[in-house]
Amino acid sequence: MDAKSTLEVTNSFPFPAVEPPATDGHHDSNALSNHVAAAPRQKANAVYQNEMIRKLREVNVDANNVGWYTSANLGNFINLNMIANQYHYQKELNERTVAIVHDVSRSSQGSLSLRAFRLSPAFMLAYKEDKFTIE
């Protein structure tokens, strides 16, 4: 729930396990990593997400999609897949959607590390017009 400047997250659920893409017998960890990272944009997962929200509402739980979450290690989380996922959520669902990042390594040092991010309108426009590069 988004109340003034506070976002309250009361429930979360993971996407179903992602099957590795078919290969020619060689193990390609980058292909699997990219496939998993793209999960929030897959149509089957959008259907799954809507079904989960419907089920939460059936048991009288306040269920609104406010974004998605991912984990990080030592603050390392910004990459093309993360940006593509956030762009997708802000464009397709709601411009106020956030990405919540849980830094597992920092949390293991004694304090919970959660951060929320949203793409700025200027960045959304640059990304849409393909004026964004990682270089």
Image (cartoon, rainbow, N blue to C red):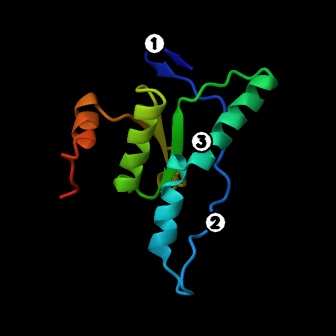
The one nearer the camera, 117 or 80, is 80
* Residue in the picture at 52% in, 86% down: 26
The one nearer the camera, 51 or 83, is 51
Farthest residue toward the right?
A: 59
Name the residue that disc number 1 marks: 4
* Residue in the picture at 57% in, 75% down: 22
Nearest to N terminus: mark 3 or mark 1: 1
Say above or below: 4 vs 133.
above
Of the residues shown, which amino acid type is indicated by label 1?
Lys
Nearest to N terminus: mark 1 or mark 2: 1
Name the residue that disc number 3 marks: 46
The nearer-to-camera label among 3 and 1 is: 3
Say above or below: 124 vs 57.
below
Q: Quadrant of the C terminus?
A: bottom left
Residue 21 position within the rendered picture, expressed as x and y whole percent measured from the top left? 56, 70
Q: Is residue 53 left or right of residue 117?
A: right
The nearer-to-camera label among 1 and 2 is: 2
Q: Is residue 111 visible?
A: no
**Callout 2 secondary element:** loop
Residue 18 position within the rendered picture, expressed as x and y whole percent measured from the top left? 62, 61
The one nearer the camera, 50 or 67, is 50
Residue 115 position within the rendered picture, expressed as x and y whole percent measured from the top left? 44, 39
Residue 19's mark? 2
Q: Is residue 59 visible?
A: yes
Instruction: Tell me the distance, in whole angstroms, between the alpha carbons under discs 1 and 2.
Output: 40 Å
**Callout 3 secondary element:** helix
Say above or below: 29 vs 87.
below
Instruction: Tell me the distance, in whole angstroms, between the alpha carbons under discs 2 and 3.
Output: 16 Å
* Residue in the picture at 18% in, 46% down: 131
